Each structure stands twice: as C-alpha cells, then as structure tokens.
Amino acid sequence: MQALRQSRPFRGLHWSCWKRFLTHSCTGNEYLELSSDVKHRIETHWKGQISGGQFDAKQPADKFYVLSMFPYPSGNLHMGHVRVYAIGDAVARFQRMCGKNVFQPIGWDSFGLPAENAANQRGVEPAAWTEQNIAQMKQQLQRLGCSFDWTHELSTCSPQYYRWTQQLFLMLHKHGLAYQNEALVNWDPVDQTVLADEQVDANGCSWRSGAKVEKKLLKQWFIRTTAYAKQLLDGLDDPTLRDWRDIINLQRHWIGECNGYAFTLLTSASNLLRVWTANPEHLKDPNAFLVLRSKHYLSKLSTAAGGGLSVENPFAGTTIPVVFSDEAAFPPDCDVYLAAPSFRSEDRELWDSFGLAISASGTAETRLNPASWELLRKEVLQAATRLNAGGYRVSSKLQDWLISRQRYWGTPIPIVHCPKCGAVPVPEEQLPVTLPKRESPDSLLCECPKCGGAQAKRETDTMDTFVDSSWYYLRFLDAHNSERIFDPSLASQFMPVDLYIGGKEHAVLHLYYARFMNHFLNKCGLSPTSEPFSRLLVQGMVMGRSFRVKGSGRYVREDEVEVVNAKKNQALLKETQEPVVMTWEKMSKSKQNGVEPGDMFDEYGTDTTRLIILADVAPTSHRNWSSASFPGILNWQKRLWLTLQEFQAAREEAPSDVDVNSEEFLAEDAKLFDARNFYVKGATFNYRHAHQLSVAISKMQGLTNSIRRTPKHIQRHGRQFERALAAQIIMLAPMAPHFASELWSKFVAVKGRLNEASPELQWAEDVLSQRWPDIDAAYNLDLSIKVNGFENCVIKVQRTLLDKVTHSDALDIAFNTESVTSYLIDKKIRTTNFVLYPGIEAILNIYVDKVQKNVNV
C-alpha cells in the first residue's frame, strides 16, 4: 500500500487552469470563484486518484466491513441510491483514515421480473438488457466518487454466481430444508407469476402490475425457514447486534412468539399439511382429528376425490380424519386445528358434534394421565426429528419460504423431474444449471441423474430473487472462487459485516432471509457467526414534493403549478385554476417529483450533491429534497475555498514583526486549540459512533466559523491555525473527496509550514492518506454524570486520564461530587452503567428509586 501511495500523483490543478476564473476583491487581490465549472474541473482532475478502496485480505486484524445493499440494475441511479452510497462511502473513507482495513464491495442484484418485462417489451434478451443497464449504472456510480472495491464486483445473474446459489439450494435440500408441495398462492394474471403476501396491496391488487390477484393451486418449492424460527428469534438478543433499534421489533413481529410446534404430515391426497400445536403430545392421541377451515384449499381436493380426506399420523401409528368446518378454536393466523379428545373435554364435545367414530385404543387410561404428558411430548419431538416431520418451535402464523417463481429470468432450481424417480437433485459436478434458450423447449429435456432415463425434464420454476441476496455478503469476500462457494477461512476473518446500510423496506423479508441463511451456513461450519450483520443503519427515503390535482388525482409537474401558500400546501393549476394538493412523497417518475442525480452532478458537482444529501437531517430520517436547503452547503464550500486562498495570501505577504509570545497572540492561538479539539471531537463521534453525518457536517461548519474569525497575523504565524485548517480539510475528505483533495493540495503548497516537524501531518501524502485528527492529550473532555437520564453534572477530565477511567473510577468521582451526593440523599440506587468513547467523552448513568418514608399514624 505504501508503494501505491508513493506512486500516486499528488498535485492539484495547475494555476494556469484557473486564470480565466479569477475575480478581484475590493482590496485588489485576485480570487478564484468556486463556480460549477471549477468544481467539474476539480472532479475531473481527482476522480482517478480518489476512487480506490485498498482492501487487504491478508490483514484481518483491523478489518472493517461496510456494506450498502447492492442495487437492482434498472439502468439509472435515483436519489435514494445517491443517499445510501454517499452514507456508506463517507463511513468507509473515515474508517480507512482511522487505520482500518476497509472492505466496501459493490455488485448487482440483477435477476428479477422488471428486467424480464422490460426486455420483452423491447424485444431483446433479459441478459443483454441487464448487462447494458449494469454498464450504465456502473458509470454513474463511478461518477458519484465512491471508493468501492470493484475487484470483488459480482452479479447475481452471472452463472459464476448462481452456480453457488444452486449449490446452496442443494445443501438445504440435503438437510431436509428444501421441499416441494402444493400450495394456494397469490397469482398475478398479468405478470403470470406468484406473489408473496407482502406484494399484494390492501385492495387485493399486485404491487407491480396493479392486476387483481387470483388464488391458484400450484406445486411449489419451499425452504423450511420455520426450522430456525426459535433460533432466529433468540438471535435478536445477540449482544453483537448494535443500533438495530425498531428493526428488532419488526423482526420479532414477523417471526412471532414461538409458543408451539409445527409438524409436516402427509395427506391421503399426497400433499404435505402443516399442523401447528402448542401441545405436541396431542399427536399421541389415537382419536386425534384435524379441523380445517371450510375455505382451505384441501377442501377442493377432498370433494374432487369423492371420499374423505385423512392424514397419516406416524406418532400414534394411526390415520387422522379431517373435517372441514369453521367452528373450531383455531390458533391465531392458522387454518388447521389439531383436536385431541383423549386430552381435552372441549375436543371430545367437538368430536361428538362431528359424529366421528371412537378408536378402540382411545380409552386407554395411560393416554389420559397428565403425569405422562411430558414424556409423550418428548417422544413426539424426538420422532419428528428422526422422521424429518417438523417438531420445530415456531409461532402459529409463521410459514415456510415459498421460493418458486414462474418466470424465466431467475436462478434455475437444480432439480430434474423423472417419471420413474420423481424429483431428483442435479449432482453438484453438473452445476451450474444454466438458463435455457427461450425459443427451444427441447432444452429442458435431459437424462435423469439417478436412473439415466431419457424422459426427464428440468424444473422450469426459478428462485425468488431474495434467495440470491440472502448470502451475497459472504460471496463478496471471495467473489471469483471457482472451486468453492467461498473460503470459510476468509469468512472467519472478515465476518460479520460491521455496518450494513439499506432502506427500511428491506428490514423485514430480506433481513429475515439473510439471517436465516447465515444461521444455516453457520451450522454447516461455513460462516463463523450466526448473525451476519453487527450494526445496521436504516436510511430514510428521499422525498420529493408532489403536486396532484384535487379533483382527478392526476399528478402534474411543479412548473404547471402556482403555489398560493407553501406552509399550508395550497396551490392552483395554472391552466385551469383547479386546486392542487401539495405533499411530500417518495420520488418516482409516475408522481413527476423525481430528481435525476446526473442533473444534480451537472449543475452543482458531485461532491456538492453528496454534501447536500448528507446534510440537515439524520441518515435514518426521510429527506425532503428541496433547493431551498442548498445554499447552506453551497456557501460553506465557497467559504472553505476562500479560506484557502486567504491563507495563501496571508503567508505570501511581506513579513511583519509579530510577537508570538504576546498575551494577545497566545490567547488567539489557544482559541484555535480549543476550537480544533471541540469540533474534531464532535465530528469524530458522529462519524464513528452515532453515524449522524448531518451533525458531523454541522460540527465541521462550526470549525469553519472559528477559522474564518482568525486575524491575519495568526493565520501567518499561528501553529494552531495551521493544525485547525488541516483538520478541517481532512474531516471533509470522506464526504467530499474531490473537493477536499484540491483544498489539501493548495494547503500543502503554501510556504512557511509551522508544523512540518510534527508527525501529525503527512505533508507528502494526499488528504485521503492522512491520519484522522486526534484530540490533544492536554485537552479536557467531559465525564457526564446522569441520574435517571437527566444530566446532573459534567466534570472536565484531561484526555489522557479520561481514556483510562473505568466504571468503578467514574462511580468514585460521582460519589465525591457534591451535586450528585446531595441529589441521592433520599434515593436508592437501582443500577448504574458506564459508557466510554475514547478521546471523546464518558457517560455515567445512575438509575435510582425514591425511598418511601414510613409515616406513623
């Protein structure tokens, strides 16, 4: 890496490039205005030097794996992409400057229905359409200036990737976790494919085509995610999970309370039926029967068969009759009820009402003895494991993952259907099973891998794209391995992902499936941890102001509208004077409220766009995109630009007599010492710990204000001014790498360095190779003492001492502080906790209850 840095050209744009942009100040000095043209020249000059993400797979000790959810290659970036990748890149560059070995890969979630539909409409192959979109979006991402590690780029539609998705399916199949069964599914008659429940809106229409969804009985492939339900629920308490906030609750709600057990039983119609019960011992009842809701899809099969439907019960060695009725006490979100008359009097009454026959063995007293129920339960659960018939702890509502999709553009399911052998897995050595030519139906014919018969056919369903994205974070580490799914030793060194960034719309299903897959691979010994993502940053949406005609609901462009009262969201359509409803909605073409990132780059520059998207609101909050918020960033950049020119001019002025030891000079220098440490502390905390990048920008702007208030003679002779200005540019670099690189090149070119001998700055290196500014050892930091969440006092402690403070030390300090002891005099301490942010601050929380005094009557 050192050789790479030394070979990198490190010079800003030559002064001759700027001559035509010069303006004159009122003092006659020449200054260069920071126009859009100037910004574009800066970005063109630096783009080849700031884009590399130098990840070293041989140095795991200081690893930091930052991953932003990979995009679907639609062909164009939108502002949501700009936001998520600007956040991820700012964190990645910050961590590199802190000495971390950062891995920030990028790839493409490139299978799926939109590409297939778009290709069909244009009369081209989905592969060609997708590759064209990838090439276009890659150019746009590179223009965004992100330091992705492109050497690890992958695409889920590549056979080099989906060959291993297929192997993953075979692994699940081998472990009894992938199976085929008939199911009543949501069918989109327009897109001709199955939809998950979450893809059907409240009106029963498809989320994509808008068509009324139909119910259809199809034979489908499932992954038995319910086998890991309890493990996935318990995993949410894993101490390695940080900042998951309300995502924990979303995951808990999706999984549900695992207060029962699910079993998979074979029906007389050769279907698998899921039976959930809180009492597995009830399956030992020889008189057990099942009640299914009258609208259950099996009711149609029962009617068609002409006879009654029954279920094999391997736990009691009996056949369980099935009754269709809505009268039973069905568990929540469940359409199957297991009745056990030998255990429950209510079920005996239900049995009588249905007129079911009594089994000869049903009166055995041992079956009714509650003392034996626990033993019976254990017997059932052990038998279920042995028979691969379920027996997993799970909620009544959670279902297995239906992965079949009746579409072409997806990962082929590696199964062959043979008239003699049934469904046969494709041998691993024959992978990948590639997508057939669509005009050639004969390409589906093949030999059976088991018997060699020539009449076998390949499975035509493809996998849900959530399968592709359920394990991509592991493949990134070893993206080009042609021998294995990935090297487990690499995974053991670099997993889990330290920071995972993406939208809240993926916080339920994608996160659930990715967690399931990693738990499975952990059990297989391939992934080192059960949880794949240590820390989450769920970014809010970018919202655009939309304008909708009140009567018709038609969306119109902003230039077609006259705003009457912006605060009350009142407007009129210019042409007809009809009232128009103004609101903030997620950007989209259909709402005519989108903003093209390319237009922003052209008008304002890439770095300015990055700063605007990161400023003003927290990354987790929705961002209302309005040009009214732009001036703050635009003016800040201009002030920074002017500061460097004024600094250069101050240093180039004729020397004057300045007493650097005078009280006035030392006082000004001390102000800059305090300002540098104060704002570096704030920016660092928000880069590293809070990820509140908008607050980090505010802290940097505060430092700019302090720098610009500095008298000219301090700029010329003050060491602390030079340090503060250096820190300013370095802290800006993760968010605006092109602009900061140009500022740094101008900074180090100024003559008369005052801190040249200090190891703090690497004068010969570019800004992105600098070490992150540190807090000075002599600077006093805050030890905050809070009682029940309210601040009681703040104690100033020198940085070198604060970094060594322990929980016990903090308690000693607190109990020797009058404001704390006087407040606690009539209170009982319930618990305390201590948080230390080295070089930033420490917080002691004391939680108390008020002591109740006994009053004698």
Image: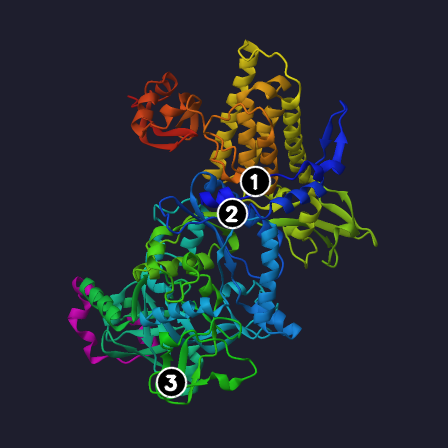
Q: Mark 2 vs mark 1: which is more N-terminal?
A: 1
Rendering coords of residue 388 (x, y %): 28, 71
Which is closer to the viewer, label 1 or label 3? 1
Report if residue 307 lies within the magenta region: no
Q: Mark 2 vs mark 3: which is more N-terminal?
A: 2
User: Measured along the vertical axis of the image, is residue 630 above or below residue 483?
Assistant: above
Query: From mark 2 to mark 1, how far is it between C-alphas?
Result: 25 Å
Query: From mark 2 to mark 3, how far is it between C-alphas?
Result: 48 Å
Judge by depth and name the residue closer to the eye, 572 or 755: 755
Rendering coords of residue 315 (x, y %): 24, 73
Extreme-bottom residue of the structure: 454
Report if residue 372 lies within the magenta region: yes
Q: Secondary structure at mark 2?
A: helix
Q: Is residue 222 left or right of residue 144?
A: left
Instruction: Look at mark 2 in the image and give the residue it sits on.
Output: 88
Rendering coords of residue 834 (x, y %): 35, 32
Q: Identify which amino acid the numbered label 2 is placed on.
A: Gly
The crowd level at tag 1 (other Cα within 10 Å; few <14, some 14-19, many 20+) is some
Q: Secondary structure at mark 1?
A: loop
Q: Is residue 828 left or right of residue 108?
A: left
Judge by depth and name the residue closer to the eye, 618 or 604: 604
Q: Identify which amino acid the numbered label 1 is placed on.
A: Phe
Instruction: Look at mark 1 in the image and give the residue it sits on.
Output: 10
Look at the image and tell me whether residue 690 can be seen: no
Extreme-right residue of the structure: 575
Q: Is residue 393 left or right of residue 738?
A: left
What main secondary structure does the magenta stretch of the protein show? helix
Instruction: Look at mark 3 in the image and give the residue it sits on.
Output: 448
Q: Identify which amino acid the numbered label 3 is placed on.
A: Cys
Look at the image and tell me whether residue 580 can be seen: yes
The crowd level at tag 2 (other Cα within 10 Å; few <14, some 14-19, many 20+) is many
